[in-house]
Image: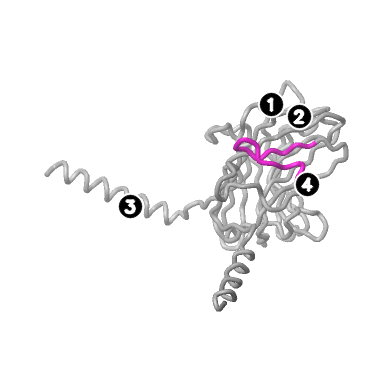
Amino acid sequence: MKTRPILAIFLLAGASQLGAATFPYTNDFSGTGANTAFTTETSDAEWALNSGTYRNTYSNSALTPTTTSLSITGVAGNPFTLETQFTVQQTGNINTNGATLGFGLFASSSTFSSTGNSYYLADFVYGHSTGTDVGRLRIVALGDTSGFTGNTVATNGAADANAAANLSITTGTTYTLRLEGSYVGSTLTMTFGLFDAAGTTQIGTSATASDTSPLTGTNFGYRNRIGLGGGTSIIDFDNYSITAIPEPSTYALLGGAGALGLALVRRRKRN
């Protein structure tokens, strides 16, 4: 009987951590261990684990953002890389509202709502019925623009691997979205680009932005906005990660350690 209060304390402690993660964070959406669906979704019918990917299925004729997120603590103030792979399996009939996919980050609300919430939106226009803005990459501050470059969008990027069509991507092909953030003093600088599946070859140019009073919300995830005149959009996301970028001093330390190791190897060879 005496152990029950202690057990209750442990259960409450575990519940308070439910749905949260810490930086660095990775998720391959395999459904095992911590590689599960995010804790907050705009609709459970739109997001689901699917054979090792996180699938967004959307067929709503209303232009409503579809989002999914989780709380990740410890990112603010640290240099980071936010990355995911994505594959557009099916586009549906994209209308004049266009189709975007991308990240919501440093959000104060888990739903990436535009009302009473502040967050950065880094998204990519992958399709439009008339070709408008197809291939555009952008970084936007929503809800709180104080200190943000230009107050709206800093510098847009342009990535179009399929310029002959009103799609900037090829359906069924896997790509990588990558956003890098670094701090100089209190200023956050971000760079956002599209890459091949391996993440080694960039397609087009990057979008960039900076904020002298950066946001510090803990909610991170996906944010899509797809205008459809019919049909269904299907996008598979995979390998979502927020990892640390080593500080320059760390690079120097690693370089020094490598040089020391090489010297020891050479000395052993001589002996």
Q: Secondary structure at mark 3?
A: helix
Q: Residues within 10 Å of mark 2 (few under 14, many from 20)?
A: many
Image quarter of residue 268? top left
Does the magenta-highlighted stretch encompass residue 266?
Answer: no
Instruction: Say above or below: 172 vs 53.
Output: above
**What element does badge 2 sit on?**
loop
The residue located at (66%, 61%) in the rendering is 216
Would you say the residues marked 3 and 1 are in contact, meaning their CB atoms lie under 8 Å apart? no
Q: What's the residue type where badge 2 is placed? A: Thr
Residue position marked by numbered label 2 in the rendering: 91
Residue positioned most to the left: 271
Mark 4 or 1: in front is 4
Residue occupying the far bottom of the picture? 2
Q: Nearer the viewer, residue 151 or 224?
A: 224
Q: Please rate how many residues cluster around mark 3, counting C-alpha atoms within 10 Å: few if below 14, some from 14 to 19, many from 20.
A: few
Residue picked out by circle 1 = 171
Write the residue at 75% across / 53% down.
112
Residue located beneath label 4 in the image: 43
Percent coordinates x, y for residue 227 in the rendering: 83, 36
Query: For mark 3, what is the residue?
Result: 256
- The earlier-in-sequence mark between 3 and 1 is 1
